Amino acid sequence: MPKGVKMEKYRPKIHFSAEDYIINDPNGLVYYKGEYHLFHQYNINEQIYWGHAVSKDLVRWKRLPKAIAPDKIGQIWSGSAVVDEENQRMVAFFTYSEHETKRQSQGVAFSYDKGRTWEKYSGNPILTDSREDFRDPKVFRYEEKWVMILSGGDCVLLYESKDLIHWNQISSFKGNQESHTGV
């Protein structure tokens, strides 16, 4: 066992786990300024947050305070994080599960201090859609633009952006009923 790994009878020896409550989907796995960042859904009494942990070696993890909390728009579901080198910040994209409508929309938050604090964009949500399923944004840099891939019910949606806030749909695709029946 690696030195410094805590041994507990019912806890994984290497894999990250929450101290309490329920941990869900991993989100936004990034390396930034000497640290690996692991974000994950964190279900605390049916309120969905993003939890956060950091590691220098991917074995020993330090839990940090909750990164992104539910707000007046909705709970914070799956998404991704990127490093925006040009603006020296980390950027998190997440799906809102809206309180009132139960619809799904996309939000964004920014961190300028290695992920220790996060500020949600005041114009959230940044993307909305009338589909029942509109979730799980995955963002990456491609050439001179950012690309977002989203699940859109029975199809996959692709968007592009130059500033990580304003997005234009550039494509979509789906299979036939035998190969794809939804999210």
Image (tube, rainbow, N blue to C red):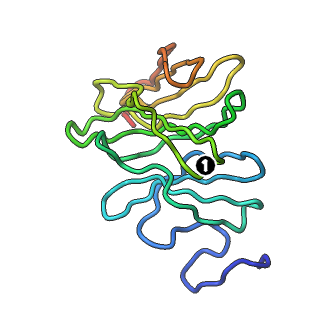
* Quadrant of res 44: bottom left
Circle 1 SS class? loop
Q: Position of residue 8 (x, y in %)?
A: 60, 84
User: Which residue corresponds to the image point at 39% horizontal and 60% vertical from the top-left?
Assistant: 43
Above or below for 3 versus 43: below
The residue under label 1 is 115
Q: Position of residue 36 (x, y in %)?
A: 70, 53
129 or 124, nearer to the observer: 124
Above or below for 179 versus 168: below
User: Which residue corresponds to the image point at 52% horizontal and 45% vertical from the top-left?
Assistant: 118
Question: Pointer 1: residues within 10 angstroms few (<14), some, or many (20+)?
Answer: many
User: Which residue corresponds to the image point at 28% horizontal and 24% vertical from the top-left?
Assistant: 130
**Residue found at the far left of this picture:** 100
Number of marks in the rendered image: 1
Quadrant location of the C terminus?
top left
- Relative horizontal placement of residue 119, taking residue 64 as reference (left or right): left
* Quadrant of res 95: top left
- Relative horizontal placement of residue 154, taking residue 90 as reference (left or right): left
- Relative horizontal placement of residue 29, taking residue 10 as reference (left or right): right
Quadrant location of the N terminus?
bottom right
User: Which residue corresponds to the image point at 46% horizontal and 62% vertical from the top-left?
Assistant: 23
Q: Position of residue 52 (x, y in %)?
A: 56, 56
Amino acid beneath label 1: Gly
Above or below for 135 versus 116: above
Q: Position of residue 132 (x, y in %)?
A: 28, 32
